[in-house]
Every structure is written in structure tokens, then in C-alpha cells.
Image (cartoon, rainbow, N blue to C red):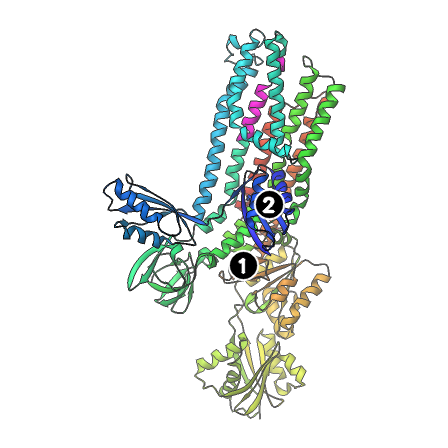
Amino acid sequence: MRHESIGISGMTCAACAKRIERATGKLDGVTSAAVNFATEKLTVEYDENVIQVGAISDTIAKIGYGVVEGRKNGEVTIPIAGMTCAACARRIEKALGKSAGVLSASVNFATERATVVYDLNAIKLSGIKDAISKAGYTPLDAERKGAVDEDRIRKEREINSLKRKFTVSAVFGIPLLYIAMGSMIWWWPFPIPRLLYPMQYPLNYAIVQIILTVPIVIAGRRFYSVGFRSLVQGSPNMDSLIAIGTSAALVYSFYSTYQILAGNFGAVEGLYFESAGVIITLILLGKYLEAVSKGKTSEAIKKLMGLAPKTAIIIQDGKEMEIPIDEVEIGHVILVKPGGKIPVDGVIADGHSAVDESMLTGESIPIDKKPGDKVFAATINKNGVLRFEATKVGSDTALAQIIKLVEDAQGSKAPIAAMADIVSGYFVPVVCVIAVIAATAWYFLGTPPAGWTHVQFALTIFIAILIIACPCALGLATPTAIMVGTGKGAENGILFKGGEALETTHKLNAIVFDKTGTLTEGHPEVTDIVVAGSSGIRDEKHLLQITASAEKSSEHPLGEAIVRKAETEGVDFLEVEGFQALTGLGIEASVGGSVFCIGNRKLMAERGILLGELEGESDRLAEEGKTPMYVVLEDKLVGIIAVADVLKKSSAEAIKSLKAMGVKVAMITGDNKKTAGAIARQVGIDIVLAEVLPQDKSNEVKKLQSEGLRVAMVGDGINDAPALAQADIGIAIGSGTDVAMESADIVLMKSDLMDVPTAIALSRATIRNIKQNLFWAFAYNTAGIPVAAGVLHIFGGPLLNPIFAAAAMSLSSVSVLTNALRLRRFEANRVSN
């Protein structure tokens, strides 16, 4: 199965999204299709042996929507020196045209620039420059369009188009409204010209309104082309409602104009040109404001994309050469000067420096780097000169992975949106039926207001219902909040892997922390060495030598701590044979011809080894929060080496914050109960799950879940993978570089545990925002449609003017977007219920 994300243009409401889902979901080979109206993307899963993405794109195009192609082709503008006439320009064009992979080339002699469109997979920018050089000219630094720029340009083009259309409609709509309503407002200081008085000069009045309405209809022509096409195809959308409503007003107005021409001057009361014109104007205004607001919801991803530098300095044949970032390949040696951004991921070959990784990890203190250390794209070299070898480029860099993670999360759907999606699918047809029934009922059974005909009365009801209904608000309620919420999380180093993870997090009422590397720094150190009397061990150094020699083959953090201690003390390592790791218990090995067992209290119990004279010492060490490692020679305890790990500074504060939020906190560890209890007391944890083997951690999580708790597991994302997968939410604490932790639902890029309560607080704020949006969207339509249908008129109240219905409809979607944007003010250091 293959996953693909396809950009879609031309959607105007949630009904459009539902229609695309239905059309693509029916295709053979497509297993799932989900459209996010806010991000304008289709996420589709399909069998590439049955169907290709091209067929999916064709289906989208057939039902009237556009497909935004991914960036497969590059476009670059290259300044060229050395041209002397138009013939030079022609020569360069021919040279570029012959180059494999160049799709088009245009050279402007006046500006001395070549604009080249090329296949990114077939030719690189360096190849294009070589072709220009071979033709006898000098290519200068290129000006290229990146994916971020392309997306920004496309969005800006859409916003400018809507702004232009609104401006045109407003220029004609304001005088149209003034002429239509001016004669009714007796106190207005600027009366309409006498030649346009409706009662005295009805034909003038009608013709001027037609002249002013036509440009407005042209500006809003897309409502008609898309709306009627969708209606004919049996999937009406918001455009259909606008097209039907305003067309009804226009048709009746033209009929009234015909009546006036025929001598029936009373038909002037049946002109509704201003309703159609002002409705289109207001809806264009709403669409313009909506487009601007939607652009703001994706600012977080744009910031991340903007972090990467555009060029890199590589060292080739001993010379420094600046090339575009897309030209960097694995194995290139890259030079980064003080203050420069690191362009791709790599390993330092030469140089020492401090690197600011705050833009990726949030860690404010620059990290010292030396040869052999890894560096990551978009981080900043603070002082020294670094030379490093590129190991990951393009979409494989840590930054690219983070961007992909955030994009996927923003494009995903949350379960809370399910009801809105269902309603959106049936909304428009139901509204059309309600409009027809209400208009018919009022025509035959209602009493029109004084001076109105039955047709005018029914038409007003019909138009008002169609115009006030707003599926947009329903479609935008959830995805916009998720976009802002996940973006805000990314800004704070919290990566949610999808809308479902973001939603589930707000329900958490229990959190299990792994101890080593999560609550603690993960750098244990030897604190005590105790030798048993008459054990055959000469002294503490001898015990350390035996234990460190055995542990040298171990990868366990406690074993590594013992080895580091021995290296610090200058101890010589002995030869080891028959090394065996005892999972969750310890190790066994032959050192200097004798078999030693080194492990925890559980291993002692399993082997039936008594602690004897060292039991009191063992208890003391455990009560101090240290982990005793028991050294056994031929079934006799010969000594204890105690190891302790320093607690993170943020651990106690994070636990306190979680408790204040009403969340139960547990700690899970392989340590004995006394050691675990001592550590738990230091940070304020009440529930201690001690002496748990790695493979049993998931069972402990399952036990908590069986008590009705919604559990999150916080671990390092590697050793704790089964428990992370079992928990309702798996939270992996990474270094900010390894974001592809498949078992986790949330990745914390920093090692600061305060990000755990922050993630919950952000989730709660986002879900609260979504509920507010959904309430407003449902309440608006639930209240607005009956009012438009004339419910208030039954009890002697007013009728809803279609113009006010259009204003309300436009503002409803804008209000939902504005509310979602409030999440941008979320503060990471403020957690609440």
C-alpha cells in the first residue's frame, strides 16, 4: 500500500471535501481517502498495483476541482555575464535546450537573465551552469524558487484574486445598494437623483441596477460555474446555494424589468438586483477574509521551512565552492564559518565549535561539538570553523523529518470531527429541500407583509435560507484548530503525530514515566564500592577491575557507568570469556578463569543467593536512591557496586504540574522497591512500579488501563517501544533529531519533562477551541435557518433580509477561523485544567 498527499484547489466548503472523498474512495485500489478542507489536501492510501496516482488526480479533475502538482520540476533564474547581443541570448537558449532534463529555457538579453524550468531528477543546477559556461558565457549566482516560495506565491495569488474580485464588486455594489435603498431612507443627506426615483422613473431605476449588477456577477462568476456544475452532477455545495439563491433573485428581477417595459410600473417592487449584488459582494469579502485567516493557520510550518539555508559551501579539489542546498550530496565535505547555518545533517571531520540547536530542540545553551559529533541542518555554528561530511540531505534531514511530521499531523483528521463530516455530506441537499418547502408553504399558506406579493414573500424566504446556510463553518471548525495546535506544539518542541493523538491527549488521567533517561539524566555514576569480608577480593579496586572487565561487553547504562569508573581510576581490564546478558537481571561471564554473576536483587532471589553481612549495606544504599549491583563469585556474594543517576531538574516540577492538572503519576523501573521508592519520594511520585523487566512494562500499562484510566507512557522511544505502543498515548523523549519513533504518538524534542504537562495543556486548549467552533457552527445554522425560514414572522416578528443573511454567513466562517487563531497565544509555561 502507498500513501500519497495530493494538493487540491477549487474547494469552497466542507461539502466539496466530502464529494472528493466519495469520488476517490470509490476507485478500485483505493483503501482510504480523507480530505482536509483547511489544508486543502487529500490523503489517500492505495494499491499501486491496481491504480496509479494519475488516475486519482484525473478523477478529482473530472468532478471539477484542480490538482496542485508537487514540486517535481525546478525553476531557476540565472544572471549571465558576457552577452553582447540578442544572438548571444539565442545561443544560450539553444545550448540549454539541448541539455537533458531542461524542459524550457528563456534568455532575456535586456535583463541578462536566463529562466530555466528543469526536471529535478534529471539534471542539477550545476549541470545547467556547465551548459552556459560551455557556450562561452559566465553564469552567476542563481535565484531559485523553493517549495515554500511556490506555496506562498500560490496562496498570495489566491488572496489577491479574491481581493480584486471583492474590490470590483464593492465598487459597483455600494452604489447599487445606495440606489435601491436610498429612496427609503428619508433622512439620508445624499438623496438619489430624481431620474432614478423608482415610482416616477421605474425603467431608469431598473436599467441602472442591471448595469451595476452585471460587473458584480462577473466578479462572482465562479459561484455559478462551480455551483451549477456541482448541482448537475448531484453533489451540491456552498457555491450551489449561492448560485441558486442569487439566480432566483436575478431571474425574478429580469422578469419584473420585462413587466416594467410592458407598462406594469408596479413591477418595480419586484426588483431584487441589489440583493443578488450585495450578497455576492459580502460573500466575496468573507472568502477573502477566510483565505487570509487560513494562511495564518499554517505559519508554524512556514517558519520551520524557512529555517533551512538556501546554499552550502563545499570543498572540492581543495577549493571552496558555494552551491544551492539541493545540489548537496551525501559525502560532500561542507565548510561552515562562524555565524553560519549548517545546511544538511552530517558528522564533523575537523574543527571545534559550539552549535546553537535551539531552533530544533529548544535547548537554549549551545552544544560543544568536536570531530565525530553529529550536526543537523538549520542549526547555527556560533564560533569555530567546522568541516563536516554530509550524511543526510534533502528529505532525510532531521529538519525535513520534523516538517513532514507536522505536515502529516496538520493534514490528519481528529475523531471529534466525525459528526461535522457526516453533517457536511448531507447539509446542502437538506438546506435546498428546506428552502423549497418553506418558500412553497409561505406562498400558499402565508400572509405576506403589507405591499408585498406572495411571490416576493416566498422568494425572500427561499433566498434567505439558501444564503444563510453555511457548511464552511462546519468544515473549518476542527482542521483549523488542529493546524494551529500542532503548529504551536512544533514551535515548543512538541510534535503530535496526528489529530487523533492531539485529541486523545486531553483525556489522559494517568502518566507512567520510565525512570532511567526520562526522570533521570541517563548518565549514571558509581557512588559506592563495598567488598564483603573473607570474599577472596583484595580491595575495592580489585572488585571494580573484575566487575568492569565483565561489564565491558554490556550495553546497559549501569554497566557502562562501571566501565567509565574503571577507566577514570586507570584500572587494567582482564580477559573475559563466555559473556552472557541476562535480560532484566544482569550479566554472567568468566573473568580470569572464575565465573562471576553481576546483577540486581531479582537475580539474587532467582539464584537463591543470600546477602548475608551485606544486607544492611544494601538496604542503606537503596534507601538513598542508589541502585546496588551485586557481584557474585561461585554462588557467593563478594561485593556490591552502587550506581546512582542524577534526577533531571525539571522532573519534580513536571510531576507537581501534572498532579495540579488532576493526572495520576506513576514511575516504572527495573530497580528494587527500596531504590525506586527513594527516587519516587524525591520527585513526588505516589505510584511506584518497581522490579519490572523491560518486556513486562507493557503489561503494567495494561493493568492501569484495566482500572479505567487513560494512560500515557513517557520513555526514550527505543527500550520502551512495547509500553509506548500499549499506552493510549506514547510520548517519546528524543534529542530533537530522531523524530521517526514509530511507537510514539508524541515526540518531545527537548529532554525537559515540563513539556509533558505542556502537551496536555495544549491538547486541552485545542479541544476546547474545537468544541467552541463546532458549537458556534451548529448553533449558527440551527438558529439561522429557522429564522431565515420565517419562524419569527409567524409570531409577528421581522423577516430576515437576504443581504443580512449573506453578511451573517460570511462572518460565521471568519469567526471560526479567528477563534482557532486564538490558539497562537497559547503559552508553554502556563498549564491549566
Determine if residue 285 is in view.
Answer: yes
Q: Kindly indicate the quadrant of the structure image that contains residue 778.
A: top right
What segment carries the magenta color? 268-284
Q: Pinpoint residue 205: horizontal percent, then vertical percent.
A: 55, 12
Q: Residue 35 carries which label?
A: 2
Query: For the residue marked with disc 1, what is the amino acid?
Result: Leu
Residue plotted at (51% across, 34% down): 288
Taking 217 as reference, is 588 above or below it? below
Q: Pinpoint residue 603: horizontal percent, then vertical percent.
A: 64, 81
Q: Kindly indicate the quadrant of the structure image that contains residue 83.
A: top left
Density class for disc 2 (Cα within 10 Å; few <14, some 14-19, many ≥20) is many
Q: Pinpoint residue 183: horizontal percent, then vertical percent.
A: 56, 12
Q: Name the quadrant of the N terminus.
A: bottom right
Q: Residue 748 carries which label?
A: 1
First in sequence: mark 2 or mark 1? 2
Density class for disc 1 (Cα within 10 Å; few <14, some 14-19, many ≥20) is many
Of the two numbered discs 2 and 1 in the rendering, the one whose residue sits closer to the viewer? 2
Q: Which mark is residue 152?
A: none
> Answer yes or no: do the residues labelled 2 and 1 have beta carbons within 8 Å?
no
Gap between marks 2 and 1 measured at Cα: 28 Å
Residue plotted at (67% across, 82% down): 605
User: In the depicted view, which residue is nearer to us: 728 or 23?
Assistant: 23
Q: Pinpoint residue 409: horizontal percent, then vertical percent.
A: 56, 51
